[in-house]
Image: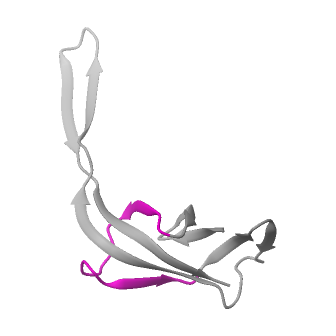
Amino acid sequence: MYAIVNIQGSQMKVQKDQKLYVNRMDAKEGDKVKFEEVLIIDNDGKISVGLPTISNASVSATILKHLKDDKVTVFKKKRRKGYQKSNGHRQYLTQIQIESIKL
């Protein structure tokens, strides 16, 4: 059984007991969160598609920890002009674990 859920503007395919990383959420570690925007549910070959979402369907998850992603280096250069600029960025993430998918 899997579901496609809208989590903070990103559509993700989730299954029970799956761990995944999403953009930083405003909740503490150990809190339970519930996602109401379920777009598709596949229950052993029986597919339910929402228009645009499935009513009364939800996905519950637990927040495991907050962390930062690996550093992404942004390097700009214009040849023969003496211009080069280096910049870096680390994205804030939250690791969640899917507890249940309710239809």
Which quadrant: the N terminus? bottom right
- Residue extending farthest to the top is 80
Residue at the (63%, 76%) spot, across then down: 38
The range drawn in magenta is 17-36
Quadrant of the image occupied by residue 31: bottom left
Is 11 colored magenta in this rendering? no
Task: Tell me: 87 left or right of 63.
Answer: left
Is 23 colored magenta in this rendering? yes
Q: Position of residue 39 (x, y in %)?
A: 68, 72
Q: Position of residue 96 (x, y in %)?
A: 38, 69
Which quadrant: the C terminus? bottom right
Residue at the (30%, 79%) spot, across then down: 26
Task: Tell me: 42 left or right of 17.
Answer: right
Q: Please, is residue 19 above or below residue 72 in the view?
A: below
Nearest the eye: 51 or 66: 66
Q: Please, is residue 67 above or below residue 49 in the view?
A: above
